């Protein structure tokens, strides 16, 4: 046991003295996280998205159409949407087609009347519907506009039902004679609906912000991806160091010391494992302190890191078992790092990827690790990490077994 | 008394090709034994097997009675190895390298630190002990390489060509410390292709060539094998062909053997004074100018020449 610890500690010492390695292990993931976040333009005002342009064409001459326009123009929504009122539906659609608006809201003529009929008018045959034209290029903005319109419509509905309830109560308590219903009901209903719609928009905005991507911090998604990406560098670097011991002559020296070859190998693996864990911990704690990122349940984060480094180490071992020279491990490691980064979702979110991709991506520790970090950042705990942890540990064990088989097939002459 | 090193019919093959072809020799406790031979003779391979790095293909060897094939752990605890190639962590300092290897051999605490200081002083690196090895000169690295091998006070020390490629002062220091270690009782197996080193250091010498031990004994015993003879060393110009001169001299009466090496021809003869004149005459006849002539007493180089017809440092 003692020789294993000695070798592992010595390797950790050597790794943390290698400036080039530190650059890749620690600085690169920080800078890339920062850079990608800046590129997506949402870092400087973390948590805010720019105003959503929306086109409104109101052809209704009643109160409800006016109320919808007012709602979009309300100061409480000012930093969320920027409405443009246009004369006709065609102009509104054109703005969407030209990508000048995330959505167009078209209120047709007779909308108010279809909900609260005028005095004496016949009850409407069918409700006249509001049309929402969405811009597929701006799914988030369009989604927010849809949420606002739906909230509005639900208030209209509340108001109408409320109006009917008021009328019924007035009748039941005898304050309104049934023969007067026809004359009084529209006025009461209309007042109730308008009152409901005119309620301050505050509640609406709060609801949108909490559920929608307005609160989205791109760094929270980038940081785990980048940490996992550069974890692959660390394990490849560890594999390289095993072959480097051979190249620099220290492996023969270790093998004539009173230790077994197995102890040497396990010691080297321990050194790489410790370096990987140290790297991940530094990145997590560093990004939490510098950028205020919230990684979630600390125990969950720690256990997930231990498992992710274990799985990544399996890939590093396989790479080392297949390579002949330190240079081959470096090149292979760089390739693996990029392929896994792309496949495993370090650059692109899987949510946007087809199903086969998501399946394939789970050959990488990156994908399982990201799954776990996502669970944690959404408030999950260690107890919710069953699947990612199992995936990572099984991956590490399988790769380790294959690599050991490959190692043991080498004759002592070739090991040197 | 069991010999400290006992080698019996040792064979080592790489992919079926024998690099060591059935050698046998013993080294007594407290002895300095040198394996002398040109590059490729099989010296490093022999040390690799004796130090349990490689298993023997046939035969066996024992260190203090422990078989290298069957009891490698017991052997490893007794030996120290100074490999031919540098084997150091360049990103660590000399002190850190020594501490690491000392702990690997089970040293710890005050004993470890005292021993590290002693070794740093011995190899002359005390002042630079906290600098990273990568900043050292070649000679400093070589000295540290040796220090690592003897840190844990091994009973047997293997030194594989420790003086290759270093400056004369470092070489002197190394030879002196080898003698000092031996004086304290350490048994030493030393390999070299420098005849002078083998002559200066060793109690006994084994001469290796092409995987075989072609001669074994004290220096006096070995030179006696060559018979009563002296060596005439003829230095010729760079443009001249030593091969042609050697051939021309071979047929002269009184010349036992004439061998060409870099810009010189070695002539082995029973009586140097007698053959000198005809040798110079024959060279003149062939139009080859001799710059100078050395007459050497019998030495190991002559033994090697005599046995193989080649110089130790032939290309
Ligand atoms: N690992 C190896 N694989 C194959 N052949 C080797 C290996 N090491 C040495 N040899 C060969 O074995 C022979 C002896 O080499 P070596 O023991 O290094 O000689 P020396 O140390 O006397 O120069 C040489 O012909 C060399 O090419
Ligand atoms: Mg050698």
Image (cartoon, rainbow, N blue to C red):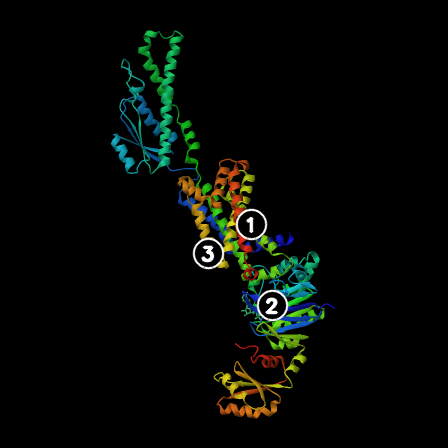
Q: Please provide percent x and percent y for residue A284.
A: 52, 44
Q: Are marks 1 and 2 on the same chain?
A: no
Specify the quadrant that holds the N terminus of chain B: bottom right
Please state the chain letter of the residue tagged with numbered disc 2 in the rendered image. B
Determine the CA span between mark 1 and mark 3.
Answer: 20 Å
Q: Which residue is mark 2?
A: B11
Determine the CA span between mark 2 and mark 3.
Answer: 39 Å
Q: Please provide percent x and percent y for residue A261.
A: 60, 56
Residue A72 versus residue B32: which sits nearer the camera? B32
Is disc 3 placed on a helix, strand or loop?
helix
Q: Which residue is mark 1?
A: A273
Residue B101 versus residue B24: which sits nearer the camera? B24
Q: Please provide percent x and percent y for residue B76.
A: 66, 61
Badge 3: how crowded within 10 Å, few (<14), some, or many (20+)?
Answer: few
Q: Give the mark toward the camera: 2 or 3.
A: 2
Please state the chain letter of the residue tagged with numbered disc 3 in the rendered image. A
Q: Which residue is mark 3?
A: A331
């Amino acid at each position: 046991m003692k020789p294993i610890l000695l070798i592992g500690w010595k390797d950790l010492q050597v790794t943390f003295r290698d400036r080039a390695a530190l650059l890749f292990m620690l600085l690169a993931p920080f800078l890339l996280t920062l850079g990608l976040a800046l590129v997506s333009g949402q870092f400087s005002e973390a948590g805010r998205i720019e105003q959503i342009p929306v086109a409104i064409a109101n052809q209704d001459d009643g109160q409800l159409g006016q109320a919808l326009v007012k709602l979009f123009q309300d100061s409480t929504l000012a930093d969320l949407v920027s409405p443009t009122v246009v004369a006709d539906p065609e102009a509104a659609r054109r703005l969407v087609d030209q990508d000048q608006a995330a959505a167009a809201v078209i209120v047709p003529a007779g909308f108010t009347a279809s909900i609260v009929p005028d005095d004496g008018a016949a009850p409407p045959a069918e409700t006249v519907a509001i049309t929402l034209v969405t811009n597929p290029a701006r799914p988030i903005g369009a989604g927010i506009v849809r949420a606002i319109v739906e909230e509005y419509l639900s208030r209209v509905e509340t108001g109408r039902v409320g109006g009917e309830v008021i009328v019924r109560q007035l009748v039941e308590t005898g304050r309104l004679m049934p023969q007067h219903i026809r004359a009084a009901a529209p006025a009461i209903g209309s007042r109730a609906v308008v009152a409901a719609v005119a309620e301050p928009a505050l509640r609406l905005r709060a609801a949108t912000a909490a559920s929608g991507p307005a609160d989205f911090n791109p760094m929270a998604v980038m940081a785990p991806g980048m940490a996992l990406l550069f974890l692959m560098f660390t394990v490849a670097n560890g594999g390289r160091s095993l072959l480097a011991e051979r190249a620099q002559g220290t492996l023969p020296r270790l093998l004539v010391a009173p230790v077994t070859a197995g102890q040497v190998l396990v010691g080297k693996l321990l050194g790489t494992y410790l370096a990987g864990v140290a790297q991940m911990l530094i990145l997590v704690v560093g990004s939490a302190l510098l950028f205020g990122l919230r990684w979630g349940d600390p125990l969950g984060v720690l256990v997930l890191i231990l498992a992710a480094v274990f799985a990544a180490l399996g890939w590093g071992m396989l790479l080392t078992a297949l390579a002949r020279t330190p240079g081959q491990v470096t090149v292979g490691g760089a390739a693996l790092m990029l392929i896994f980064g792309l496949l495993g979702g370090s650059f692109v979110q899987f949510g946007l990827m087809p199903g086969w991709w998501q399946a394939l991506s789970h050959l990488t520790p990156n994908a399982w690790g990201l799954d776990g970090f996502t669970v944690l950042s959404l408030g999950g705990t260690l107890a919710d990490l069953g699947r990612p942890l199992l995936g990572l540990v099984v991956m590490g064990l399988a790769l380790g077994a294959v690599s050991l088989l490959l190692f043991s097939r080498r004759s002592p002459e070739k090991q040197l | 008394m069991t010999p400290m090193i006992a080698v019996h019919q040792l064979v080592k093959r790489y992919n079926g090709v024998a690099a060591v072809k059935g050698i046998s020799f013993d080294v007594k406790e407290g002895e300095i034994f040198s394996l002398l031979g040109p590059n490729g003779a099989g010296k490093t391979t022999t040390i690799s097997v004796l130090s349990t790095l490689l298993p023997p293909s046939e035969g066996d060897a024992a260190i203090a009675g422990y078989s290298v094939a069957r009891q490698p752990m017991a052997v490893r605890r007794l030996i120290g190895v100074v490999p031919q190639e540098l084997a150091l962590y360049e990103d660590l300092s000399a002190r850190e390298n020594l501490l690491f290897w000392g702990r690997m051999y089970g040293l710890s605490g005050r004993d470890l630190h005292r021993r590290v200081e002693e070794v740093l002083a011995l190899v002359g690196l005390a002042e630079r002990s906290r600098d990273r090895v990568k900043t050292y000169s070649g000679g400093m690295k070589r000295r540290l390489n040796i220090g690592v091998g003897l840190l844990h006070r091994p009973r047997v020390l293997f030194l594989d060509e420790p003086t290759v490629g270093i400056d004369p002062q470092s070489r002197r220091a190394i030879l002196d410390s080898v003698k000092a270690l031996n004086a304290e009782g350490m048994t030493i197996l030393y390999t070299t292709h420098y005849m002078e080193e083998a002559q200066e250091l060793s109690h006994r010498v084994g001469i290796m060539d092409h995987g075989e031990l072609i001669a074994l004994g004290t220096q006096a015993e070995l030179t006696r094998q060559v018979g009563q003879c002296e060596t005439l060393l003829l230095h010729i110009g760079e443009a001249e062909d030593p091969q042609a001169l050697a051939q021309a001299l071979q047929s002269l009466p009184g010349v036992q053997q004439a061998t060409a090496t870099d810009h010189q021809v070695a002539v082995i003869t029973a009586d140097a004074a007698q053959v000198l004149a005809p040798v110079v005459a024959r060279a003149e006849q062939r139009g080859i100018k001799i710059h100078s002539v050395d007459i050497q007493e019998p030495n190991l180089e002559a033994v090697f020449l005599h046995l193989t017809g080649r110089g130790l440092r032939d290309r």
